[in-house]
Image (cartoon, rainbow, N blue to C red):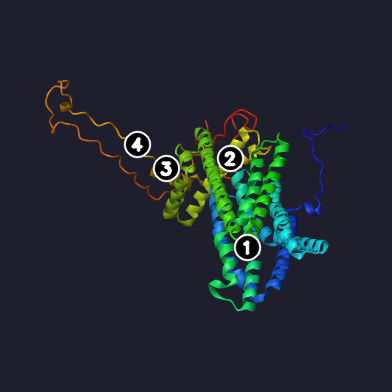
Amino acid sequence: MATCPPYPTRAHRHTHWWQHTWVRYGALITLLALSGLVILALVREQTGTQGFLVGLGLAVLPVPLLIAAFRWLDRVDPGPWRNLLFCFAWGACAAALIAIVANSFATRWIATATADPAGADTLGATVIAPVVEESAKAAAVLLVFLFRRRDFTGIVDGVVVAGVTATGFAFTENILYLGTAFGTDQLTGDSGIASVTAATFFVRVVMSPFAHPLFTVLTGIGFGIAALSTGRHHLRRALLPLAGLLLAMGMHALWNGSAGFGEYGFFAVYAAFMVPSFGLLTWLVIWTRQRELGTVRAELPAYVLAGWLTSVEPYALGSMRARRIARQYARRHAGKEGARAVARYEACATSVAFLRRRGRRGRAGADFTARERALLEALWHLRGVARPALDYAARATAPPPPPLPRPVPPWAYPYGGAQGAYDARTAPAPYAPHPAPTPYAPYAPYAPHAPYGPHAPYPAPSAPYGPHAPGGPYAPPGPHRP
């Protein structure tokens, strides 16, 4: 008699060749490489070899500064470098190729249809170019949002992804403009400050290196707000990125059309619109980053009660200054590997704090428990190096205690409230300031009371925990278990 197996068996699913990860990565790399070769040939054809090299040397100058600025904004919960490399490559190769081909085709078609080349150029710069370019750059943000959703959790992530994509696009565009200007100078014989190359460099690299990132950041903010929305608001999640894209197109069109506002139209738009917008968005991103640090300080105490973290770690991990001091302390006492271990500890602790916040809001997903367990295990393995460094950083950055009230001498009571005269020999000494914390000695790896490793059995939680289940974090293995 046949019996059913004790557990249901799942039918073997055949995995098609295009579903393998290496196939998708290979196709993406091939697409970006081919786009890069084509855009290289197009730019070199328009600028010449010498103009291309001059444009490349000048256009690369603002790129490290912009990448460093966006990476600084993402220091609380830094995303993987592979996402940034993809975004920069997409902006410099794929988006630039789409923009050059589409803008040229649209401008020629309008010029042929209207027999007005000057009007076609103006219409192409103020209408066609903003729509095509911002849509091409927004495609990278959309791809990261869809396929790297775990790394796209809020406004800061949207700003960084969009800004790096626009930096790559501006890099290629600056090569084209600067190389063309150098070719013009070669024909006219101009050189120095009065040359077209110097004027183009001043406008595009010195005055407005943030122009393209500023436009596309609006699209990134739309996607970031959509990432913060719960799963029930499907319409809002779809409309917010579209609204950000439309704002980016509008700002881009205003910037391109500023040259047609008169002799000083460009400077008027720059001073009255671009600079305030840049300052406002910078303030918004920094304020959002401070909120992320507040989330770290608010969510991590639950793991202190469970024994995963020490009592001072939520404060240290919620301060960028304390984080930096902890990495410096680890570098002095354990070298570069110790500093990297502390940086990984900080990243894992921040990720688990954000994951817990999403779990409380019902947005963590079905793999919440597995991801929380993996992050906590990573923290547990790095605790021997990270805990002394964070403890030292917490002591070094702790606010000073409030001053204690000084004792009132007897002579301060003029109406006989105190008996006897003031005697300096018996009066209490003034309070001395608290001594500075002494630095720790070089620390050794923490030895747990019970064996623990990647292959040891993981203890079951005392109560199920998830986005909708009661209970706190898992208790750590070893001495903290009852």
Disc 3: CA contacts within 10 A as few (<14), some (14-19) or many (>=20): many
| Left or right, 181 with reference to 399 | right
Judging by the rendered image, the residue that carries numbered circle 3 is 394
Q: Residues within 10 Å of mark 2 (few under 14, many from 20)?
A: many
Q: SS for tag 3?
A: helix
Q: Which residue is mark 2?
A: 354
* Residue bearing the label numbered 4: 401
Task: Find the distance from the CA under tag 2 to the CA under tag 4.
Answer: 31 Å
Given contact means CB atoms under 8 Å apart, are the residues at marks 1 and 2 in contact?
A: no
- Circle nearer the N terminus (1, 3): 1
Check whether the beta carbons of the residues at disc 1 and disc 4 lie within 8 A of each other. Answer: no
Q: Earlier in the sequence, mark 2 or mark 4?
A: 2
Q: Determine the CA span between mark 1 and mark 4.
A: 51 Å
Residue 48 location, x and y as percent?
68, 75
- The residue identified by callout 1 is 171
Distance from Cα at disc 2 to Cα at disc 3: 21 Å
Q: Residue at x 20, y 35 (%)?
A: 429
User: Picture quarter containing residue 255?
Assistant: bottom right
